[in-house]
Image (tube, rainbow, N blue to C red):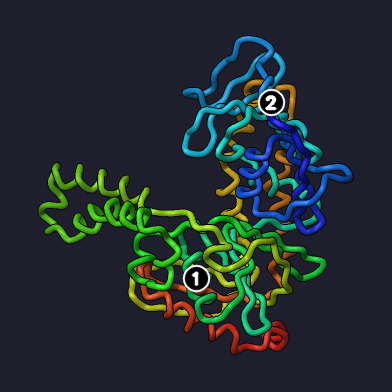
Amino acid sequence: MVEMQATDFDLAGFVRVRVIGGQSDTDAVARQLGLPRSTASGDPDVTVVFDPTMEPSGPLRFLGYEDAAYDDEDFFVLRAKSKARALVRIPFGDVGRNVTVTCHPGLPAVPLLIPLLAVTALNRGLVPLHAGALSWNGSGIVVTGWSKGGKTETLLAATEAGARYVGDEWCYIDPGAGRVVGIPEPVTLWAWHLRRFPPVRGVVPLGDRARMALLDGPDRLERRLPGVVQRSSVGRMFRRVAYQLRLRANAWVSPTTLFGVTDAASVPFEHVVLVTSVSVDDVTIQPTAASDIAARMAHSVRYELEPLMRAYEMYRFAFPDRRSEALDRLDRDLDVAIHEGLDQRVGWTLQHPYELDLRRLADALREVLSHDPVQDLKL
């Protein structure tokens, strides 16, 4: 018999996530959230219950190939991380206001938990941003952009040069306080990081390094093939295989191992840097209107929340008479909140090639730190 316990995870005093389950399930959620634990108290905003006895009330009607399903009463997500089978009940009508997610135990991660946290935080006055953050020589910097644009690489470069890691992947802005809350989620390192940035090699176990090199090898070989071979039917097939293998040439490393941090941090920030990978070898940084960055990032956050919104559309298909007010007004609320969080900051655009010596990114960021943010905002 697994001993059930209630543990709270706090996001900057704005959102409280309560987990009710055994130790291993609580630990899995802790790794997923990256938030500090505390004894359960008060009313939670999001509750995750691990219940081995949960079952549908009747036959399931499937949506997609066992992606989701519904019975006469409830909606269920059937896939977890890495397509693992799951049974997760989500009452979408409660999203944004004390939602309770019920799962079978033993999941590697709770499906849609991070997007649910983001939407709940938005309803509590925080601005969810697909971004990283750091503090360097007394200046707070939010580093944002499209997925695979170079956020993690910029954080790696800056921390090696002396910056303090605050968060990666998801950060939350408190507009009233002018602060950013970083979530220390696991960091994805790719094979090229190990080649181009030797300091990170030592944090990746030898077995993972060997696996990453093996999976990355076909892609590197394909890029060196003559054009006539690449364009042939065999070359195109090899390219597809090499690409799929390269997508697996990575390893997750905890921020404790990589940066020495264990808990979420909150720092004041003055700068917001939009990072973009480009097809040329130059690394450039130039001033940019923060409102322009905000307009772009509203679309980026929507893109990151798409898995949640796709599930919500399935839920509406299953139960046309039910709806979530928070999700129905999400587009409008995101636009307003992201502009409120970013418009009055000092904006920059940092462009770089995809694979580069990460020290060049650190040198570019020094340009940001050479500016007085108060003076820049007056210009």
Percent across and percent down for residue 250 are 40, 54
Picture residue at 55% right of the left edge, 56% below the top: 186
Per the image, the residue denoted by label 2 is 1
Picture residue at 60% right of the left edge, 53% below the top: 301
Amino acid at the residue labelled 1: Leu
Percent across and percent down for residue 3 are 73, 32
Q: CA distance from mark 2 to mark 1?
A: 44 Å
Picture residue at 78% right of the left edge, 59% below the top: 12
Percent across and percent down for residue 108 are 55, 39
Per the image, the residue denoted by label 1 is 156
Which quadrant is the N terminus positioned in? top right
Is residue 346 visible in this depiction of the protein? yes
Percent across and percent down for residue 63 are 54, 22
Q: Which mark is residue 84?
A: none
Amino acid at the residue labelled 2: Met
Picture residue at 57% right of the left edge, 72% below the top: 273
Front residue of this view, candidates 70 and 349: 70
